[in-house]
Every structure is written in structure tokens, then in C-alpha cells.
Image: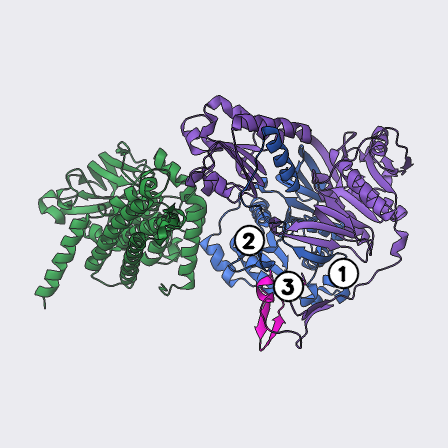
Chain colours: A blue, B purple, C green
């Protein structure tokens, strides 16, 4: 079974803060990590290979440093890694990212299953997985919490829905996105880390993918970010006073305004 | 298409360096240089005081965008029942449609859902595009994406809104890809720009640490998903009239590559503490174990989890699995309501990174107030039940 | 400080730290409370290739030595001294095979230990033979192609949990310490059983039991080295493993300093964080200095051992002695800095102080270490 896992390198977001005075992102000391949801995807890919044989190829699109994430994926058990990197890919929104990754997957070729995390923690869009499936014209099932059965041509999974779960059968090849309930990712092994250090990472640019400059990156992205700003700062220690009904009114109004209820 | 630093304007002030979320900028000589790590996010353009950085955007509209008219909302239904998020979309869609002077329509896919279509009109839809066929009984990405795409191609709406639900987030990205248009996920605010008439879509990014406003200037329709409970529901008016436009489905033409075997509904009483978006916690101020009922009631109304301080767990009022703090769980919910908790250092260690903290305590000197977003000096036995009652009314 | 670790050594340290943070810290209090052997964590360590760091690659290990084992032990100890001893004691049980085993013995026993499939343990101490190993009562009597073992070993770390035991028994009592021999004994053999699990002050998740031999027949091929070499096997083993106790002590102390520092910065008294008071600052400074000094000595000693140097008893004893006394002092001071909170089980420093105490006692009390050091000093001086 040939499995492709798509991953993204993201900043560890809890550490990304905005400096309220300058309104700029404070990124000192922010490390880059594998998107946590993608770690479940890697683990599931590796488990499937351990169960059915085959290979796990990890794929990412990003700047040259994204190689670190690919090496980490190898230390966690992936066999091969491919990096799609080109200045022309900059400014990609989810449409262009899906397109570029789909081209990478076509070039890898001959796959049975593509596994992605349900979303990335920096953008939280959950759009790239289904987008890739659409470009490849293969079936797609989101939010998988369990792979019940898999053989050469059929996949039976549990899809987490808002009110419970559905058991879905899909033809292969297919693309699935996984939720954290699916497994507990292992820690890397020392041998895995040593392998990862030595591993050769395949790197493909625009030319390697054989696509035109205006079909990727910003030119191919329908959306445009026009403003980035800090959400209204957290009120520090506001005391609510009055009679009980007054207090309750104020609090409910505040919480609604803060969009936490 | 590129980002450019205008050397004559750049004063090497380095403001852009920390602003770049990707660490792509360095100063070489006396001018900022942007490296390959750049994703053209524009953060540096925002902060540059001398307007020395510019993104040159040569994108332009493809085709005649003015032929796209109307605001559509996707009306999600499960077994004939329209989800409440659809009514929220109608509420928001109505505002946008009025600002544009364009009609508001709902798209309804399902099997035997005519009644639901009528319902959507009561809630403000001028038109309902109805695809009613046994093949659409269950949700499948393939069929739903194909039918919606065909409808959009046929009727060319200007805006399409969908709930950011499991279903919406699953199939809408496929529709956007098919149409080669933009899609903005999880919007918390939608506005029509009074001049350009474009849809300004604002959403949180980086785990809510920053907000981004996004446009889709050159492609149509402009598509967005909206999270449940963010927008206000439309009001039902049974005198409203509207048009139902039926879309005939040729089931044979639909590609269906997935099959639903079983649907299992799961309603869990206990919410996992560390994963919960809302936590209501009780402390020694509750006085006795039975009073945790007050905390549970409030948590239930809010769909949140129940937390507890160490003394209550030690006293055996509630199991250890509920303990928040140094030796309990570390939590980071959107909302943390501390009731009768003084805020000892070991408790604060487990909860102080919550987005919003509400503290209710009789002692105005209690340390919990130092970390509270909203502090209430008062008797929890008055305030908590009143809050529960109030939320019951507000949240239905 | 930069100890010029190789890339692989850095990986070992980082991975051990990750395991400690993610897998051990969340459960250490519970393991201590329940006195439960940390099998889950042993499994993680095995899957991460941590169990064979010091075992040659031909036997499935990673091909490192005492230093690599020390790096991992230190990081694990920083989170939990109890888990660390479960891990390191397997090394103690393995070193006799590594140092004195013949090819067949190595091939039979080392791969399963290297992969973490099996744990090892070392059986030397008895009720009448603690610091005075000459008092060993357990006997091994040759009988055809077997030895028959009788006697009881006491306070054996990993007792009952390990599969492979290296046990010292008297083959010739008349010869005293020259009459001891070492055997490899497998769990499950007839006549080999375990006594009750001891209740301890610290390192409570680790298992400490008696090993009871009643006419236990051990095949002759399981004799390590030769008859009468038992004490030499034991002493050479301890020479190699004492830096590991040193590393454990450094780790526990570092963990305590981490806690004390973070507490001192948060804890506000008289309107200021207590870290702004010089009394606290000086304690923190002393703690950090002592830890660094012990670490430097432990690392230098472990590297010395790995270099193949012949006589390492003195430095090996020095590093264990210094690190263990340091650890007791630092953990006690950490409890002091946390004050009342430090004395409560709510915070981890109380456990660290309990865990620290054993490092002054096992693998030779610190008094015995001083004897070893002094004896060697006098010997060296006399031979000049």
C-alpha cells in the first residue's frame, strides 16, 4: 500500500502573540513544529504500513526550512519525504496550496491513500484536504476517528460528525483527514532520528512540477488578505457591580460580545 | 507578482523583522531584504512606517463579475430538520443582501424536504433552490458538492455562505475548488464594503491571536463559512412569501464513491475537561458536595465541562478527574467561570491562560480576581442560578 | 555549559528530555502514590531505542557507553528519580554480562535487553551483606552440569519485574571474597522466586524485592567469567555504573532547581516575587553551582570509564559520592524555597527530596565510597 501524508510546518501558535503597542506579531522564540493534527496523520500512515506493508511518503509545501518538519516525520516512521518549494508558491491561499500539493502527489504517483490532518493550527481552515481530493478527483472523507477496515480497493472508516459518527465506505484511492481521536502519536526513536538526519529529501520546484507560474502562489489565489489586526484586548479585571439581575445582564452581554458563548 | 522593498524609502528601522511571522526579513546593508520564507502575508507592509514595502498584485477579474447576483446560504438539514445554523446564516445573509440590494436565497438539498423549504422562506429567504431526491437523503461529499456547484454555475450568485459545521467544512472546499473561487473559513464578521461592494470577511488566525480580513476580489461567488452561534438567527415570519425553484436531479449522472453504512448518535454527558471550550468550576465556597449541582446546571446550559478546585476534590465532593490546577489538569478554555474559588497559586497555575475568566467570590481580596476578566464580588448562590436561568433563555 | 556532546549524544539527551516531559512528568506523582512499576514508560523507552544505548550494535544496541547511559538517566531523573532507577538498574544487571560474558552469553541475553523486551537486575546485597559484601550467605554448589543456588538476596531493584538476573553467590565459602561467583539466572526457573515488595521512602514506583533461591539449578554455561571471579565482576560492574547514580543525582537535583526557580519567580510575598530576595537568590546560586560541578565530574568520569581506562574505582566513587551529597542538599534547599508548599505532596519537590536520599545509600553508601577513595589514595601514595 502506498500512502502519502500531507503535512504543514506551523509556528507553535500558543506562543504567537501581538505586541499591543506596536500591533506586530511577536515571534521571538517561536519554534516551528509539525502541525499537531498532521502528527496524527503521520502516525496513522505508519500504523497502516505496519499493518498492510508498503511505504509512507510525507509531502509538504513550504520554504526550504520546512525540510525540518519532513525529517521529523521520518524520525516518526515515514519512509520518504518530498518538499515542494519555490518562490513562486509564496502567497498561496488554500486553493493554490491544494492545487500545488495535488501536482506534487500526481508526480509521486501511484498512491492508494492520502492522509491529512483535519486542519492546520495556524490557519484553521480545514480546506486543503478536500481541495486536494477535488483536484485529484478522488473520493474524500473528513474527520476520520477510526479506520475499521482497509484493503486494496475499499476503505471503511468512522467519520466524526457533530451529533455522533458515521460509518462510511469509500473506494480507493481516496483522501481522508483525521481527528485526534484516531490514535496517540508515538515519540520518535533514536534510530528514527539517526535515519532522519541521513535521509535524502526530494525537493521539487515549479519547473519540476511542470506547471506555469500563474497557476500557483498568489496569482492563482482567489482570496486576498487586506488587514491583519489584534482582536480587542482582554479587559483586565473589570469588576461587575449592581443587583444580581444587573450583574447577570452585564455579564451575559459581555460574554456574548467576547463571543465565548 | 512579488513583494518589493523600495530601497530609497527603507530606513532600516527593523520594525518589519519581528512583524514577520515567518522570520523572512533581514537587514542587509541599510535596507530590508525579504527571503524565500516569505508567504506574501503582508504583515510587514502593515507595520512599515515609511511605506517602503509593497506587494505588487497583478491579479485581475476573470470575466464579468457583475453578472453574479444574490446572496445564497446553504441550508444544512439532517433528516428533514433544518439546522439552526441555517437560520443564523439567513439572519446575516439578510443584512448583506439588503446592503447590496440583491435577493437572499437558500439552497436546500435532501429527500422529502419541501416543508423545510417553506420554513426557510419564513425565516427570510426570497428564493429557495430545492434539490429533492432520494440520492440526497444522506450527506456525501461527492453528491452535495456536485449539485451545489451545478446550481451556482446555473444561477451565478454573488455570495455563498455555509455553516462551519462538520458537513459544511467537509464539502464546501470542494465546491470552491471546482468553481475556482475563494473560500474563507470560520468568519466571525461579514461586512459589505460601501464603495467596492466587496464582501469583507473577518476571521481569527493563529489560534485567535490575530484577526484577518479577507476579500475575494477577482472571482465569484465570494464564499465563506460561518461558525455556529456567531451570527444572530433570523426571525420567523409566517406571512412571508417566497419562490421555490426546484432543481431536477439525475441520480445516474452523479458520481458517488462513498457509501453510508451506519449513523451512530452519541450524546455524552461528560465533556472532556482539557478539550472543553467552556469550563465552570466550583470551589470550597460551595460549602457542601450537593451544591456542585449549581455548577453542573450552569455547565450544562453552556455545553461546558465541570471543573473543581483541589480542596473540593480532597474532600471527596467530586472525582479527581475534575480537578484543575498544579496537580490536576491544565486547561485553556475560551471561557472559565470560577465559582467560590479563592484562586490559590496551585489553582491559577492550571487555568490562567483561559481566554476569558469570570470569577465569582464573596471575598473581594481573593487572588482569583487578579486574573479575572470579569470579577463579581457576590454570593455564588444568588448569581450562579440566575446566570443559569439567563443563559437558558438566551441560548434556548 | 557546553560539554561538547556529539550530534548523537545531543539526540539522546533531547529525546530523553522529551520522553520525560511528555510521558513521565504527568504521571510521576501518581506512580509514587500508588507505588506502581512504570511499565508504560519502560515501553516508551524501549520503542525509542533508549534501552540499548550502552550495548554494542552487534547485540542490537546503539553502540554507546556509560556516558550515553548517563545522559539518558540524568534527563529521566530530572522528571522522576523512581522511573530513572527502573531504567538504570537494568543497566546495572546487564553490565556483568557486557564486561565478563562470553560470546554465547552475550548473544543469548543482550539483544532482548537492548530492545527493551526484557529488563535486567543485579543481585548482590543480602541481609547480612550490605556494605560488607564478604558476608554473602547465598551458595552455589556444582552438581553435574549445573550449579545449585540456595539463599536469599535482599533489596534487589527491578526484582520481580526483570527477566534476567545477574546474581553473586559463594562457590567456595572458605576462600571468602575470592570464593564468590556470578551467575545469570532467568525469571521463571524452578527454585527461583521473589519475596515481598518493599515499601520505601522514595523512588517508590521502582520495585525492590528479595530474590529467593531454593535448590535453583543454574546451567554451568550461565556462570560469568570463572569461579571465584564474583567479587571482581561486582566491583568492575559498580565502577561502570556509579557514574549512572551520579547522573541520577544530578538529574533529580536539576529537576528540584527547575521547580524552585519557577516557584520563586511566581511566589509573591511582601509585594515582590521571592526571587528578588537575596536570601533566596543565594540559595538558588549555590544550588546551580553545585549541580554544575557534579555534572562536570559525572560527565568527565563517564567519559574516562568509556575510554577503557583500567583503574576507575576512585573517580567512579568520587562522582557518585559528590553528586549524591549534592543532590540531598539541593533537594532539601528546594523544599525550603517552596516553604510550606514544598513540604506538601501537591508540589513535586517533596518527592524529589525523598528520592534523593537513596542516591547516598545504594550502589555503595557514601561512607563506603570514601573508603574506596581513601584506600586508593593511600595505595597510590605508597607506590610512588
Question: Is residue B23 inside the magenta stretch?
Answer: yes
Picture quarter containing residue B130? top right
- Residue sitting at 44 percent across and 51 percent down? C18
Task: Please tell me how crowded label 3 is: few (under 14), some (14-19), or many (20+) other residues with Cα within 10 Å.
Answer: many
Q: Which residue is mark 3?
A: B47
Tell me if A184 is positioned left or right of B213 in this view.
left
Q: Which residue is mark 2?
A: A12
Q: Is residue C243 above or below residue B17?
A: above
Q: Where in the figure is residue B274, as x and y percent of width and height?
A: 53, 39
Question: Is residue C294 inside the magenta stretch?
Answer: no
Viewer-nearest residue: B70 or C134: B70
Q: Secondary structure at mark 1?
A: helix
Are the residues under marks 2 and 1 on the same chain?
yes
Q: Which residue is mark 1?
A: A220
Viewer-nearest residue: A86 or A234: A234
- Region in magenta: B12-40
Please state which of the two labelled residues, at mark 3 or mark 2, is closer to the viewer: 3
Q: Where in the figure is residue B23, as x and y percent of width and height?
A: 58, 64
Amino acid at each position: 500500500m502506498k500512502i502519502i501524508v500531507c503535512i504543514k510546518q506551523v509556528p507553535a501558535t500558543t506562543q504567537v502573540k501581538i505586541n499591543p503597542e506596536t500591533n506586530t506579531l511577536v515571534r521571538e522564540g517561536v519554534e516551528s513544529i509539525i502541525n499537531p493534527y498532521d502528527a496524527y496523520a503521520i502516525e496513522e500512515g505508519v500504523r497502516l504500513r505496519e499493518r498492510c506493508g508498503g511505504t509512507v511518503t510525507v509531502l509538504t509545501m513550504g520554504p526550504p526550512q520546512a525540510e525540518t518538519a519532513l525529517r521529523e516525520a521520518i524520525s516518526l516512521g515515514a519512509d520518504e519525504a518530498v518538499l515542494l518549494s519555490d518562490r513562486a508558491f509564496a502567497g498561496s491561499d488554500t486553493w493554490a496550496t491544494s492545487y500545488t500539493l495535488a501536482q506534487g502527489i500526481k508526480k509521486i504517483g501511484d498512491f492508494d491513500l492520502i492522509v491529512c490532518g483535519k486542519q492546520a493550527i495556524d490557519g484553521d481552515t480545514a480546506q486543503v484536504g478536500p481541495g486536494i481530493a477535488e483536484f485529484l478527483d478522488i473520493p474524500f472523507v473528513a474527520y476520520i476517528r477510526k479506520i475499521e477496515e482497509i484493503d486494496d480497493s475499499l476503505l471503511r472508516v468512522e467519520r466524526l460528525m457533530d451529533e455522533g459518527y458515521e460509518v462510511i465506505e469509500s473506494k480507493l484511492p481516496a483522501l481522508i483527514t483525521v481527528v485526534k481521536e484516531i490514535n496517540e502519536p508515538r515519540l520518535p526513536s533514536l534510530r528514527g532520528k539517526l535515519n532522519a538526519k541521513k535521509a535524502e529529501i526530494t525537493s521539487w520546484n515549479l519547473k519540476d512540477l511542470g506547471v506555469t507560474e500563474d497557476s500557483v502562489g498568489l496569482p492563482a489565489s482567489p482570496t486576498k488578505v487586506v488587514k491583519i489586526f489584534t482582536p480587542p484586548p482582554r479587559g483586565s479585571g473589570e469588576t461587575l457591580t449592581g443587583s444580581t439581575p444587573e450583574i447577570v445582564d452585564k455579564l451575559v452581554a459581555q460574554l456574548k460580545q467576547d463571543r465565548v458563548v | 507578482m512579488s513583494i518589493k522593498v523600495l530601497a530609497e524609502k527603507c530606513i532600516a528601522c527593523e520594525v518589519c523583522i519581528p512583524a514577520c511571522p515567518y522570520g523572512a526579513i533581514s537587514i542587509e546593508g541599510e535596507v530590508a531584504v525579504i527571503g524565500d520564507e516569505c508567504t506574501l502575508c503582508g504583515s510587514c507592509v502593515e507595520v512599515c512606517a515609511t511605506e517602503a514595502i509593497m506587494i505588487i498584485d497583478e491579479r485581475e477579474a476573470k470575466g464579468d463579475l457583475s453578472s453574479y447576483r444574490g446572496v445564497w446560504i446553504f441550508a444544512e438539514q439532517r433528516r428533514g430538520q433544518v439546522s439552526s445554523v441555517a437560520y443564523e446564516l439567513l439572519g446575516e445573509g439578510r443584512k448583506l443582501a439588503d446592503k447590496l440590494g440583491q435577493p437572499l436565497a437558500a439552497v436546500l438539498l435532501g429527500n422529502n424536504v419541501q416543508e423545510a423549504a417553506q420554513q426557510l422562506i419564513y425565516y427570510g429567504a426570497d428564493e429557495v433552490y430545492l434539490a429533492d431526491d432520494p440520492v440526497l437523503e444522506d450527506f456525501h461529499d461527492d453528491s452535495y458538492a456536485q449539485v451545489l456547484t451545478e446550481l451556482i454555475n446555473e444561477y451565478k450568485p454573488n455570495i455563498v455562505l455555509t455553516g462551519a459545521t462538520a458537513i459544511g467544512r467537509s464539502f464546501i472546499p470542494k465546491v470552491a475548488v471546482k468553481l475556482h473561487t475563494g473560500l474563507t473559513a470560520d468568519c466571525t464578521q461579514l461586512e459589505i464594503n460601501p464603495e467596492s461592494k466587496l464582501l469583507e470577511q473577518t476571521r481569527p488566525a493563529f489560534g485567535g491571536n490575530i484577526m484577518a480580513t479577507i476579500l475575494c476580489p477577482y472571482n465569484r461567488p465570494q464564499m465563506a463559512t460561518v461558525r455556529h452561534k456567531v451570527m444572530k438567527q433570523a426571525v420567523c415570519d409566517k406571512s412571508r412569501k417566497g419562490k421555490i425553484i426546484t432543481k431536477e436531479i439525475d441520480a445516474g449522472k452523479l458520481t458517488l464513491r462513498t457509501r453510508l453504512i451506519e449513523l451512530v448518535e452519541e450524546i455524552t454527558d461528560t465533556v472532556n475537561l482539557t478539550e472543553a471550550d467552556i469550563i465552570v468550576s466550583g470551589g470550597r465556597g460551595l460549602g457542601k458536595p450537593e451544591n456542585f449541582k449549581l455548577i453542573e446546571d450552569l455547565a450544562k446550559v453552556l455545553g461546558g465541562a465541570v471543573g473543581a478546585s483541589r480542596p473540593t476534590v480532597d474532600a471527596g465532593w467530586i472525582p479527581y478527574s475534575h480537578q484543575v490546577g498544579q496537580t490536576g489538569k491544565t486547561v485553556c478554555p475560551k471561557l472559565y467561570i470560577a465559582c467560590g474559588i479563592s484562586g490559590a497559586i496551585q489553582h491559577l497555575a492550571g487555568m490562567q491562560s483561559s481566554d476569558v475568566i469570570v470569577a465569582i467570590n464573596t471575598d473581594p481580596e481573593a487572588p482569583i480576581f487578579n486574573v479575572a476578566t470579569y470579577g463579581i464580588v457576590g454570593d455564588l448562590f444568588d448569581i450562579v442560578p440566575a446566570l443559569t436561568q439567563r443563559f437558558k433563555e438566551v441560548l434556548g | 555549559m557546553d560539554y561538547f556532546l556529539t550530534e548523537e549524544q545531543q539526540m539522546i539527551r533531547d529525546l530523553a528530555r522529551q520522553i520525560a516531559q511528555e510521558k513521565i512528568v504527568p504521571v510521576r506523582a501518581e506512580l509514587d502514590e500508588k507505588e506502581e512499576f512504570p511499565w508504560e514508560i519502560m515501553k516508551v523507552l524501549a520503542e525509542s531505542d533508549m534501552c540499548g544505548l550502552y550495548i554494542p550494535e552487534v547485540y542490537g544496541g546503539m553502540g554507546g557507553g556509560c556516558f550515553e547511559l548517563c545522559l539518558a538517566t540524568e534527563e529521566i531523573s530530572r522528571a522522576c528519580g523512581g522511573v530513572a532507577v527502573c531504567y538504570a538498574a537494568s543497566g546495572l544487571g546487564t553490565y556483568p554480562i557486557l564486561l565478563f560474558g562470553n560470546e554465547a552469553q552475550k548473544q543469548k541475553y543482550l539483544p532482548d535487553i537492548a530492545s527493551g523486551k526484557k529488563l535486567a537486575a543485579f543481585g548482590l546485597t543480602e541481609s547480612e551483606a550490605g556494605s560488607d559484601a564478604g558476608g554473602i550467605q547465598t551458595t552455589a554448589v556444582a552438581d553435574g552440569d549445573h550449579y545449585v543456588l540456595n539463599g536469599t538476596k535482599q533489596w534487589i531493584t527491578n526484582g520481580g519485574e526483570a527477566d534476567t538476573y545477574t546474581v553473586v553467590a559463594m562457590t567456595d565459602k572458605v576462600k571468602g571474597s575470592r570464593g564468590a561467583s556470578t551467575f545469570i539466572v532467568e525469571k521463571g526457573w524452578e527454585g527461583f522466586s521473589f519475596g515481598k515488595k518493599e515499601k520505601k521512602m522514595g523512588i517508590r514506583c521502582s520495585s525492590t524485592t528479595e530474590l529467593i533461591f531454593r535448590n535453583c539449578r543454574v546451567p554451568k554455561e550461565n556462570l560469568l567469567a570463572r569461579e571465584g571471579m564474583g567479587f571482581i565482576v561486582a566491583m568492575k560492574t559498580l565502577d561502570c555504573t556509579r557514574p549512572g547514580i551520579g547522573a541520577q543525582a544530578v538529574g533529580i537535583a536539576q529537576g528540584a532547581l527547575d521547580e524552585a526557580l519557577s516557584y520563586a519567580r511566581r511566589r509573591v510575598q511582601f509585594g515582590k516575587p521571592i526571587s528578588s530576595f537575596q536570601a533566596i537568590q543565594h540559595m538558588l546560586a549555590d544550588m546551580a553551582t553545585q549541580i554544575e560541578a557534579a555534572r562536570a565530574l559525572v560527565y568527565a568520569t563517564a567519559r574516562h570509564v568509556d575510554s577503557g581506562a583500567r583503574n576507575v574505582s576512585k573517580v567512579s566513587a568520587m562522582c557518585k559520592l559528590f553528586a549524591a551529597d549534592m543532590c540531598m542538599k539541593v533537594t532539601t534547599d528546594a523544599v525550603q524555597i517552596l516553604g510550606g508548599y514544598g513540604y506538601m505532596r501537591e508540589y513535586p519537590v517533596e518527592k524529589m527530596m525523598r528520592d534523593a536520599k537513596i542516591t547516598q545509600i545504594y550502589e555503595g553508601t557514601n561512607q563506603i565510597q570514601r573508603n574506596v577513595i581513601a584506600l586508593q589514595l593511600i595505595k597510590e601514595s605508597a607506590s610512588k
